[in-house]
Image: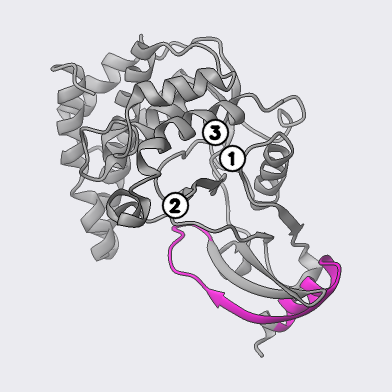
Amino acid sequence: MSDFQFALTRTLAKALPGFEHATSITRLSGGASQETWAIDAVMFGVNHPLILRRSPDGKERALDTSHQIGLATEAVVIETCREAGVPVPRVRCVLQSKDGVGSGYIMDRLPGETTPRKILHDTAFDEIRPLLARQCGEVLASIHQVDVSALRTILPVQDGPALLRRYRDIYDAHDYPHPVFELAFKWLEPRLAGTGLQTLVHGDFRHGNLLISPRGIEGILDWELAHIGDPLEDIGWLCTNSWRFGVAGKVVGGFGDLQDLVAGYQASGGGEIDLEQVKNWIVYGSLKWGVMCMGMYQSFRADHSVERAAIGRRAVEAESDLINLIIHGKI
């Protein structure tokens, strides 16, 4: 047993009532910014599947506090959401420095799949796929109705203008002109002037962070970009073409229609949705993704990472999406 596994087992014994032993501790692939470990823990003679989410090598990393939250704060947000009825895993414990495991938290491991290809094409999801857009609306409504009074001291406030300024600064820092991106920034400035709405926003509500089984949405993962802002940001990001994975005709994640999402959102108390504003946030999503891809290309020039090169070349896809949205009016 490694020092890490020994420390983790000791932590589990302290944190989990009835803990006996761990039958497996396995590092999972995926997770661009954090490590994910699958744990099978026996408690009172019954196996309980768990997940450890921790910072790389357990070391707390420097955060851009204007848009990222730490893992301890992420755990608080998840538990606040769970208590409000949002489908999220139960957080079992937040790691302390004295545990010797690193920075992170342990939560229940829920069933489901996050891989877009499987969700969009595997026959196991054929029956639930037409229902997912409405379920997304219902889940988003539950997130946007969470009482944020206790979260205002730990979460940043990021409205449309603030987000646009952030990506404008990133774009300008690269000194790599893209005329279509320039057009999109100018087009969005008056249109993201702010609606006055301020709710809890997941910040990355899309494929990869939606845990889906043949029964439907099991849980919402990866809350590190959570903030207080315009709820339409979440809807627009989910509907951005980059997250449809080739099924462009299905606006919501490549699996559903916007009217179904809206119906689920409104039926669950999320309020009225301005579809023109949703389009504005889809434009923002395409611009944001394009700037992110552009940044990946700049990183590739420094380290020659094949992964960064593959993502970086997708900036042109975002440009095409922006032209279709702004000039041709297609979502």
Q: Please name the residue shown 46% across and 59% down the image.
A: 31
Q: Which residue is mark 3?
A: 139
- Report if the CB atoms under discs 1 and 2 are less than 8 Å apart: no
Q: Please name the residue shown 72% across and 32% down the image.
A: 151
Say which of marks 1 and 3 sits in front. 3
In this rendering, the count of numbered labels is: 3
Q: Which residue is mark 1?
A: 65
**Amino acid type, label 2:** Pro
Q: Nearer the viewer, residue 55 or 221?
A: 221
Q: Which span of residues is magenta-colored?
A: 6-34
**Amino acid type, label 1:** Thr
Quote the CA–CA distance across marks 1 and 3: 26 Å
Q: Earlier in the sequence, mark 1 or mark 3?
A: 1
Q: Please give left or right for residue 212 compared with residue 288 in the image.
A: right
Disc 2 element = loop
Quote the CA–CA distance across marks 2 and 3: 17 Å
Name the spot of residue 181 as percent of width and height, x first.
Answer: 23, 28
**Amino acid type, label 3:** Val
Name the spot of residue 136 as percent of width and height, x first.
Answer: 47, 34
- Report if the CB atoms under discs 1 and 3 are less than 8 Å apart: no
Res 288 → quadrant? top left
Residue 9 in magenta stretch: yes
Residue 214 shows which numbered tag? 2
Disc 1 element = loop
Residue 171 visible somewhere in the drawing: yes
Q: Earlier in the sequence, mark 1 or mark 2?
A: 1
